[in-house]
C-alpha cells in the first residue's frame, strides 16, 4: 500500500530533448493518494500511457523521480514494484487454463500451492470467473479475457496499485458498463489505488473520484468530475470535457467590456469595471469560456432573468440545430467569427432565425493564455444596460 | 430449403481437372502403370500385379535405406528446430543489425544444392579444407570419405548449415508478430525468462513451427543432391538415403517396375508422416476448444 508521488517528473523518447515539444511528459509534480480511484483522461498521444508505463516501471523516466511513499523506485523494474497493470488489449497466456492464468503471478513468486488455490478461488468469485476456471484461456471472449487480465493483477496481495490502460476498448458496449461497475466494487472491497487511463470522459467520470486531465504531456487539471465541468482550469479541459465542449471566444478589452472574436462585427459583452481592471493588468491571450449548458436563449432566459436584469444580451443567427436525442444543440453565430453552442432541452421550442441569448455571469470563465484566471465571476456590477453593436437591447 | 441441382455445373471444374491431370494425375498414373508391369522393352511387357510391391517391402537394402532415412530426418529436425528457435530468439529485435542478420541467414538458402555439396566436400577435406584441416590439427582423425560416422556427421552438419536459416527466419517472423504488451504483462507478472518462452513465445510460434517442421521433414526425407555430391552415398551405403536408392534402381539399373512401386510407397510414407505431424500439432488445439 502506498501513495505514488511523481516529483519533477519528465520524460522524452529522444536522446537529447531541447524544447518542450520533445517531451512526452513535461515536468510535473503529482500525487496519487493511497486507495483512491483515479482516472487519467486525455486525447490520444497526450502521454497518458507513457505516464502509466513510468509508474509501473516499464519505462524509466528521463528526469525526476517516482516515489512509492518514501521509497524512490526509479531504478526498480516492474517486477519489484508491487504494481499491476491491465492493458488495452487483454493479455492471457493462451495455453494455460483460466485457473493457471490467475495463479501465474503467485506461482512466479513461489507461493505455496494451497495459498495460490484459495487466492485464485477468491478472485475468481469476485470477477465471476468461477465457471470458467478449467477452460483454456485462448477460447474466452474478449471481456472474459480482460477479466482474467484484471484477475492476474488482483490476485497478488502485495499489489499497491493497479493501473488500467484503456482496459475496456475492446469490450462490447453493453459489457463495458458491467465491467466498470465491477471495477468500482473491487476498488471499494480491496482499497487498492487504481489509476484508470481513458480518453472517454464518461468512463472517467463513472469510475473515478478524481480525474486528472492530460494535455500535451501535462496534467492540466486534477479534480472531481464536477470541478472539471464547472471550473475547467485550462481551455483544453473546457473543450474536452462536456458534450459539446465549452464555448470559447478570444476577447479584447474595451472601456465598457470586452469584444468577442475579431473584426467589425465583433459583439461587445459588458463586464464589471473591476474585472476589466484585472484583465488590463495582465498581458497575454484572453479568452472567455462558457458551457453550452449555461448559455440561455431568450425564451428560457426571460422567465428566470428578471432578478438579474443587468445581464447583457447578445443577438445572433441560428445556423444549425442538432437533435441529439435527449437534448438539442443550437449553433448561434453572434458575429466576430464566434459561433456559440447552446444546449437546450429536448422538448424546448426549436429556435430559428435571429435569437437573443445571454451568458450568465456566474458561469463565465476567463482564460489567460489558456489557463483559468482566478477572478470572481462577473457580478452585478455592470452599471447600465447596454445596446450592443448590432442593436440588440438588453 | 429446396436445393436445386444442376449437374452441368460440374463443367466449371473442368479447367482445374485438366491442369491437375497433366501436372499430377497422368504422371502419377504412369508410375502406377509401371509398378504393376514387368517391362523389358516397349513391346515386351507383362502384367505382374502386386509382385513388385511385395518384393520391395521385403527388400533388405530398402529397409536399411528407409531406417537410415528416418534417423536422418529426425536428427535433422531434432537439431534444426531447436537451433532455429534459439537463433531467432537471439536475433536483435530492431536496428541496423536486423538486416545484417537476415542477409547472413538468407545466404545459405540461396546457394544451389549441388554447390552446397561441393562446398562441404572441399571444406571437409583434410588437405585443403578448413574444417577437415582444423579437425586434423586438433588431433582428430577425420575422414568423411572412409569413416561412416564422419560421413554422417558431415552430411548432418551440412544440412544444418544449409537449412537452419529457414527455421530461424520463420521463427523470427513469428516472434516479431508477438505484441510488446505480452512481454510487458509478463514482466508485471514477474515471469521468468523461461516462463516467457514457455507460455508466450512458444505458443505463439506454434503455427510457424508447424510449417517449419513439415517443410524440413519433407525436404530432408527427399534429400538427394547434397549427400550425393558430398559422399556419393558412401562409404559403402552408409549415407545412401531413399531417393538415392530409388535413383540407382530406376536409372542405374533401369528397373522401372520396381522403382515405380518403390516411388509410390515412398510417396505414401511422406504423406503419412506429414499427416501425422499435422494432426498431432493441430489436434492439440481443437482438444481444448
Image (cartoon, grey):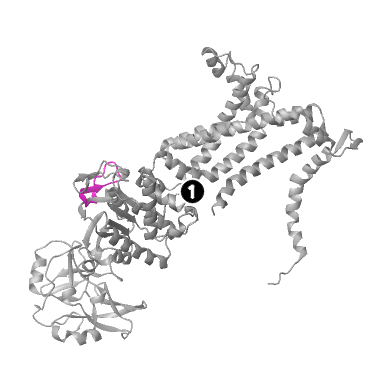
Q: Is residue B244 left or right of residue A69?
A: right
Residue A224 drawn above or below residue A349: above
Q: Which residue is mark 1?
A: A95
Q: From the viewer's side, name the closer residue of A366 and A146.
A: A146
Residue B184 seen by the camera? no
Q: Is residue B231 left or right of residue A318?
A: right
Q: From the viewer's side, name the closer residue of A39 and A37.
A: A37
**Label 1 SS:** loop
Q: Range of the magenta residues? A: A1-20
Q: Residue furthest right?
A: B43
Residue B212 drawn above or below residue B246: below
Q: Locate the C terminus of chain B by quadrant.
A: bottom right
Q: Is residue A62 left or right of residue B44?
A: left
The residue that appears at 46% across and 34% down in the rendered structure is B100
Image location of residue A102, percent across then percent down: 40, 51
Residue A117 seen by the camera? yes
Q: Is residue B24 magenta?
A: no
Q: Residue furthest front?
A: A114
Image location of residue B89, percent across then percent down: 46, 37
Amino acid at each position: 500500500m502506498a501513495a505514488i508521488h511523481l516529483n519533477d517528473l519528465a520524460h522524452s523518447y529522444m536522446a537529447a530533448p531541447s524544447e518542450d515539444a520533445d517531451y512526452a511528459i513535461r515536468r510535473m509534480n503529482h500525487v496519487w493518494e493511497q486507495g483512491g480511484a483515479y482516472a487519467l483522461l486525455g486525447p490520444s498521444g497526450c502521454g497518458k500511457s507513457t505516464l502509466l508505463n513510468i509508474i509501473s516501471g516499464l519505462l524509466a523516466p528521463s528526469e525526476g523521480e517516482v516515489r512509492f511513499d518514501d521509497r524512490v523506485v526509479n531504478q526498480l523494474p516492474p517486477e519489484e514494484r508491487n504494481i499491476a497493470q491491465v492493458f488495452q488489449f487483454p493479455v492471457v497466456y493462451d495455453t494455460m487454463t483460466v485457473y493457471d492464468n490467475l495463479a501465474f503471478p503467485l506461482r512466479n513468486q513461489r507461493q505455496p500451492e494451497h495459498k495460490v488455490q484459495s487466492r485464485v478461488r477468491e478472485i475468481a468469485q469476485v470477477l465471476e470467473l468461477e465457471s470458467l476456471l478449467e477452460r483454456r484461456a485462448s477460447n474466452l471472449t474478449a471481456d472474459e479475457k480482460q477479466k482474467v487480465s484484471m484477475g492476474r493483477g488482483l490476485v497478488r496481495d502485495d499489489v499497491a496499485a493497479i493501473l488500467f490502460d484503456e482496459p475496456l476498448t475492446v469490450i462490447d458496449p453493453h459489457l463495458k458498463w458491467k465491467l466498470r461497475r465491477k471495477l468500482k466494487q473491487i476498488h471499494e472491497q480491496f482499497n487498492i489505488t487504481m489509476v484508470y487511463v481513458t480518453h472517454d470522459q464518461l468512463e472517467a467520470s463513472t469510475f473515478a473520484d478524481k480525474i486528472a486531465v492530460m494535455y500535451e504531456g501535462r496534467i492540466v487539471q486534477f479534480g472531481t468530475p464536477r470541478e472539471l465541468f464547472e471550473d475547467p482550469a485550462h481551455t483544453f479541459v473546457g473543450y474536452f470535457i462536456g458534450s459539446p465542449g465549452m464555448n470559447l471566444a478570444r476577447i479584447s478589452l474595451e472601456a465598457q467590456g470586452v469584444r468577442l472574436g475579431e473584426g467589425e462585427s465583433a459583439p461587445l459583452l459588458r463586464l464589471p469595471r473591476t474585472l476589466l481592471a484585472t484583465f488590463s493588468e495582465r498581458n497575454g491571450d484572453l479568452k472567455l469560456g462558457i458551457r453550452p449548458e449555461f448559455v440561455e436563449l431568450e425564451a428560457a432566459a426571460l422567465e428566470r432573468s428578471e432578478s438579474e436584469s443587468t445581464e447583457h444580451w447578445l443577438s445572433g443567427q441560428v445556423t444549425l440545430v442538432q437533435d441529439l436525442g435527449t437534448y438539442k444543440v443550437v449553433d448561434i453565430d453572434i458575429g466576430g467569427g464566434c459561433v456559440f453552442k447552446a444546449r437546450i432541452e429536448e422538448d424546448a421550442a426549436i429556435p430559428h432565425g435571429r435569437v437573443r441569448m445571454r451568458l450568465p455571469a456566474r458561469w463565465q470563465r476567463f482564460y489567460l493564455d489558456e489557463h483559468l484566471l482566478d477572478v470572481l465571476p462577473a457580478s452585478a456590477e455592470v452599471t447600465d444596460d447596454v445596446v450592443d453593436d448590432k442593436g440588440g437591447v438588453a | 430449403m429446396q436445393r436445386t441441382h444442376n449437374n452441368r455445373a460440374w463443367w466449371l471444374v473442368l479447367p482445374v481437372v485438366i491442369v491437375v491431370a497433366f501436372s499430377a494425375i497422368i504422371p502419377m498414373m504412369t508410375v502406377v502403370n509401371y509398378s504393376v508391369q514387368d517391362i523389358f522393352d516397349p513391346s515386351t511387357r507383362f502384367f505382374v500385379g502386386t509382385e513388385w510391391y511385395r518384393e520391395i517391402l521385403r527388400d533388405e537394402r530398402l529397409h536399411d535405406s528407409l531406417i537410415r532415412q528416418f534417423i536422418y530426418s529426425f536428427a535433422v529436425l531434432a537439431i534444426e528446430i531447436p537451433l532455429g528457435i534459439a537463433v531467432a530468439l537471439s536475433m536483435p529485435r530492431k536496428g541496423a543489425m536486423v538486416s545484417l542478420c537476415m542477409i547472413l541467414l538468407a545466404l545459405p538458402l540461396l546457394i544451389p544444392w549441388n554447390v552446397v555439396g561441393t562446398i562441404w566436400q572441399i571444406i571437409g577435406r583434410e588437405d585443403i579444407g578448413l574444417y577437415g584441416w582444423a579437425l586434423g590439427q586438433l588431433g582428430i582423425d577425420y575422414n568423411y570419405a572412409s569413416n561412416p560416422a564422419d560421413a554422417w556427421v558431415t552430411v548432418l552438419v551440412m544440412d544444418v548449415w544449409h537449412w537452419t536459416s529457414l527455421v530461424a527466419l520463420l521463427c523470427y517472423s513469428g516472434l516479431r508478430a508477438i505484441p510488446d504488451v505480452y512481454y510487458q504483462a509478463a514482466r508485471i507478472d514477474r515471469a521468468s525468462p523461461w516462463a516467457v518462452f514457455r507460455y508466450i513465445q512458444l505458443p505463439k510460434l506454434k503455427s510457424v513451427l508447424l510449417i517449419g517442421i513439415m517443410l524440413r521433414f519433407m525436404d530432408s526425407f527427399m534429400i538427394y543432391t547434397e549427400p550425393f555430391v558430398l559422399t556419393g552415398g558412401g562409404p559403402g551405403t552408409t549415407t545412401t538415403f531413399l531417393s538415392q536408392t530409388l535413383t540407382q534402381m530406376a536409372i542405374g539399373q533401369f528397373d522401372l517396375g520396381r522403382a515405380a512401386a518403390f516411388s509410390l510407397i515412398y510417396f505414401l510414407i511422406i504423406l503419412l508422416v506429414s499427416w501425422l505431424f499435422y494432426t498431432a500439432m493441430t489436434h492439440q488445439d481443437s482438444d481444448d476448444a
